[in-house]
Amino acid sequence: MIERNSGFANLSAGYLFPEVAKRRRAYQEAHPDAKIISLGIGNTTEPLTPHIAKAMADYAASLGTKEGYSGYGDEQGLSELRGKIAEVLYPGMAGADEVFVSDGAKCDIARIQTLFGRNVPVAVQDPAYPVYVDGSVIVGAAGKSCASGYEGITYLPCTAENSFFPDLSEVKPGTLIYFCSPNNPTGSASTREQLAELVAFARKNGCLIIFDAAYAAFIRNPKLPRTIYEIPGARSCAIEINSFSKLAGFTGVRLGWSIVPSEIQFADGTPVRQDWNRVMTTLFNGACNIAQRGGLAALDPEGIRETTSLVDYYLENAKLMQAALCGSNFAAAGVQVYYTGDSPYLWVKFPGWKSWDIFDYILDKCRVVTTPGSGFGPAGESYVRFSSFGHREDVQEACGRLSALSLERS
Ligand SMILES: *Cc1c(COP(=O)(O)O)cnc(C)c1O
C-alpha cells in the first residue's frame, strides 16, 4: 500500500475543540432543559455590515450578466484590492506588489510552511493558536513528539509572570518564529518596545518572524502597533499574515492577505517573495471574486466606520465579561483576569485549578462554555479563555450567571 506521510503519524490528536463539544453535548443530554451559552468560540456571531454585504450582493448579481461575468482572476488578488490594502493599512510600510490576497489567514499559515525545509527550526509562543505547531508537524518540520511537545519546536512560555512576552534567548539562530499579537488565546497585545525587541532579535540571529495580526482591528490603545511594520527593521525579517475574518466578520466569507516585503531573503539570497509568489500561483488559484469586492468595500471610509463599530460591539461584550469576572466572588478565590481592552479574548487564571476542572465547574454551575487554556499549550494550564464573540443578550445572561457563581469547592 501507499506510504503514509510520517508527519500525520506524529500529529497528536486535536483534542481541544472536539473535547469541548463532547463535554457540552454530554451536559446537554443530562440536562435537556438547560440553556447553555457559549463564551468558548473564536467565531464571529454578528451579521455582515450593510455597505459590505451590499457590495458583495451587487457583485454576485452582476456575475449573472454577460457584461459583469468574470472567471479566474490573478492568483495574488485583484490589483485594486492589493493596492487598497497597502494604501489603507500599510501606508509607507508596504507596497501593492508585496500584498498577496488569499482565502484566509489559517490557509496562508498552512501554505507558508511549504516555503521552508524540514530542517528549519520552529519557535512558537506557548500557549498558541494550534495551526503553527500542527502545520509544522504535517510538513515534517517539528520532529518527533516528546514530553514537552515536539523535539523540533521551541516553546516560548507566555504567562502573567513575563507579561505574556517570551524570553527569546532560548531561540536558536535561523529559526522561524510564529508570533501572534493581539494574541489568541491570551488576548495580550505586544507593546512597541516588545515588538522592537522581537525584531532586533530576529535580525541579529537570522530568524524569520511569521507575524499573525488577525486581531489587529481590536487594538484600541493608540500606543500599540497595529502591524509589525511599524517597527523599523521589520521589513527585512517579518512576514505578516492577516484576515478580514475578525475585522469584518468574514469567517464564513473567507478572505485574508499576507505581506511579504521584497527585502526578505533566504540564506542563498533568493527573495522570499519570489518563492511565495510561486506558492500562491501554483498551490492556490485566487480568492473568491465576490469576497474580494467585500474586502474592497470594507476598506472604504463607510466600510471602516461599519467594521469599527462591529468590532466595538465585541469589545463592549468583553468589558461586560471583565466586570463580571472581576466580581467579589472571583476576587475572593484569587482569580486573575488578564484583559487590556485590545482583543476579543479574556485570559483568566484560576490559581489551584486545572483548566479542564474549571471548564467543567463553570459548565456545571453556570451552563456557560469556555475554552480550557491548557488546550493551547502547557503554559495555558490553570487558565481559561473567555471569548467575547456572542450576541449581547447571551453575554449579559452569562455574566449574570457568572456573577452569582460561588467558587468555594466542597
Ligand atoms: C481566527 C484566527 C485567524 C483567522 O483565520 P482565517 O483563516 O482568516 O479565518 C488567524 N489567526 C488566529 C490566531 C486566529 O485566531
Image (cartoon, helix red, strand yellow):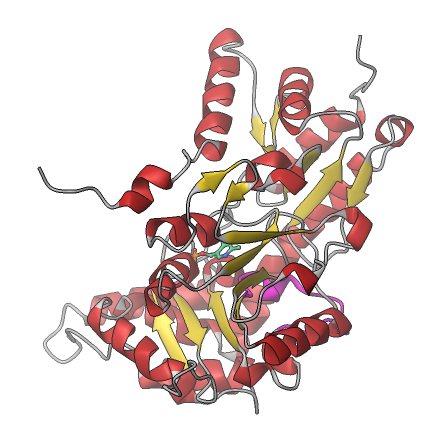
Q: Quadrant of residue 59?
A: bottom left
- Examine the structure image and report whether residue 58 is included in the region drawn in magenta: no
Q: Quadrant of residue 308?
A: bottom right
Residue drawn at x 66%, y 29% as measured from the top left: 355
> With 286 as the anchor, is 107 left or right in this view?
right
- The magenta-colored residue range is 211-226
> With 10 as the anchor, is 172 left or right in this view?
right
Q: Nearer the viewer, residue 178 or 103?
A: 178
- Give the answer, above or below, for where 197 lies relative to 404: below
Q: Quadrant of residue 217?
A: bottom right
State the image coordinates of residue 112 (x, y, percent, origin top left).
Answer: 37, 66
Main secondary structure of the magenta stretch: loop
- Give the answer, above or below, for where 232 lies relative to 241: below
- Give the answer, above or below, for where 265 lies relative to 257: below
State the image coordinates of residue 309 (x, y, percent, origin top left).
Answer: 62, 62
Q: Quadrant of the C terminus?
A: top right
Residue drawn at x 47%, y 89% as measured from the top left: 263
Q: Nearer the viewer, residue 22 or 365?
A: 22
Residue drawn at x 53%, y 14% as measured from the top left: 27
Q: Nearer the viewer, residue 256 or 399?
A: 256
State the image coordinates of residue 184 (x, y, percent, origin top left).
Answer: 59, 51
